[in-house]
Image (tube, rainbow, N blue to C red):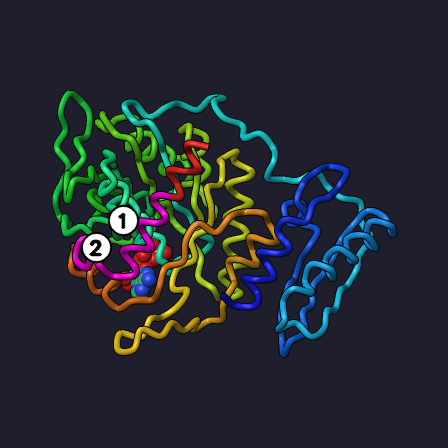
């Protein structure tokens, strides 16, 4: 376990005696980093006395970590806002259930290229492998890629009784904006058009009999997300990120978007977290360890999975059979299965 993970495990249980909330969930511990045995963090509290007490407790608890030689705490006195994430999600109002679907799960990211579609596709297959009935809607108007990942490019969905019939592949029912577009045409969608298209994909399609409908959103926080959150009663969302700092800043925005839209956050998935050497099995955190954990600490959003960088993940996607099927024994596959189990736990809680 890395130092930062140890620090995290220790700090996450410290409670504010007044509100009984964890300090990390209140966003009172921030900017945690460890360098050459020196741990620095920022501590926020409402009064001098609280700052003092929290500091004492933090120092006391961190004594158990041998690697830490010194602790630098930057203190800030500030009135504490009520925790954002505890707000009851606005569910229901104006939103409809997708007929025949138990849970609609959103997969979002602050920016493109972090592996959102890869996560959506393999998560769908992981849930299927656990025995659930799963659908996958590729709602990425700017770069739909699910059809390619499942090898169903160029297939058009049938229409029966005025409903689109999803294309079934590897046990997953799939519809994609991409099935209606040709790959060469760049799409310029305006807000109302996106809204209309989303409405059709959710309500004029036959998604009957599904436990889960996974929605792969476009990156960012645009019209598609707004439309979907106004139209559909979703059970929760997951945000995908990579460990670099820029990407974390982006995922913060995605998380804030979920909060604003009243979508319950199931967690953050950190993709391309580490590399496992195929020869010796050594695990390297290429971009530094603990990025998503830092986010967890700052925003109180749980990290529900870390996926290794693995060339098989990308080649499988390109060849039309996601890694979960093409390499069932790989660490990446195991990581996706763990995420599926985490999501089920969260929904049952
Ligand atoms: N864990 C991983 N290891 C190796 N390559 C990956 C991994 N995750 C995604 N990729 C590759 O990175 C590229 C971007 O992934 P994609 O899922 O399309 O991202 P997004 O949907 O966020 O734009 C793809 O070529 C994909 O195969
Ligand atoms: Mg994508």
Q: Secondary structure at mark 1?
A: helix
Q: Is residue 28 above or below residue 129?
A: below
**The residue tagged with tag 2: helix, strand or loop?**
loop
- Does the image show residue 168? yes
* 3D distance between C-alphas at marks 2 and 1: 7 Å
Q: Is residue 198 left or right of residue 262?
A: left
Q: Are marks 2 and 1 in contact (CB under 8 Å)?
A: yes
Ligand 1 within 8 Å of the CB at mark 1:
yes
Q: Quadrant of residue 206?
A: top left
Q: In this view of the protein, which residue sits in the foreground, 40 or 279?
A: 279
Residue with the mark numbered 1: 121
In the foreground, 256 or 332: 332
Q: Residue at x 69, y 75 (%)?
A: 69
Return the residue at label 2.
322
Judge left or right: residue 63 versus residue 250: right
At a point 75% along the width and 64% down the height, the residue shown is: 73
Quarter of the image for residue 231 reads top left
- Majority SS type along the magenta span: helix
Give the extent of the magenta segment: 324-341
16 inside magenta stretch = no
Which residue occupies 12% across, 44% down?
Answer: 155
């Amino acid at each position: 376990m890395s130092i930062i993970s140890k620090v995290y495990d220790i700090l996450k249980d410290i409670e504010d005696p007044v509100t009984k909330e964890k300090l990390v969930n209140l966003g009172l511990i921030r900017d945690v980093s460890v360098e050459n045995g020196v741990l620095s963090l920022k501590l926020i509290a409402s009064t001098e006395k609280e700052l003092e007490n929290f500091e004492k407790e933090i120092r006391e608890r961190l004594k158990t970590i041998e690697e830490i030689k010194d602790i630098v705490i930057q203190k800030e006195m500030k009135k504490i806002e009520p925790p954002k994430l505890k707000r009851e999600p606005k569910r229901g109002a104006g939103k409809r259930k997708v007929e025949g679907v138990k849970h609609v799960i959103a997969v979002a990211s602050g920016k493109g290229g972090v592996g959102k579609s890869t996560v959506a596709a393999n998560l769908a297959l992981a849930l299927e492998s656990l025995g659930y009935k799963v659908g996958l809607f590729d709602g990425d108007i700017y770069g739909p890629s699910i059809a390619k990942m499942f090898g169903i490019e160029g297939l058009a969905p049938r229409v029966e009784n005025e409903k689109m019939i999803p294309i079934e592949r590897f046990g997953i029912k799939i519809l994609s904006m991409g099935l209606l577009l040709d790959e060469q045409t760049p799409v310029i969608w305006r807000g109302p058009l996106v809204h209309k298209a989303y409405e059709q994909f959710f309500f004029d399609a036959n998604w009957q009999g599904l436990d889960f409908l996974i929605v792969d959103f476009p990156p960012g926080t645009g019209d598609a997300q707004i439309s979907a959150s106004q139209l559909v009663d979703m059970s929760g969302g997951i945000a995908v990120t990579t460990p670099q700092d820029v990407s974390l800043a982006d995922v913060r925005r995605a998380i804030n978007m979920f909060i604003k839209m009243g979508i319950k956050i199931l967690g953050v998935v950190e993709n391309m977290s580490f590399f496992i050497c195929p020869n010796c099995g050594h695990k390297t955190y290429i971009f530094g360890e603990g990025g998503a954990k830092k986010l967890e600490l700052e925003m109180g959003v749980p990290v529900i999975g870390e996926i290794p960088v693995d060339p098989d993940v990308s080649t499988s996607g390109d060849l039309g059979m996601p890694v979960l099927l093409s390499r069932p024994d790989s660490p990446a596959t195991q990581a996706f299965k763990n995420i599926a189990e985490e999501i089920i736990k969260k929904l049952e809680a």
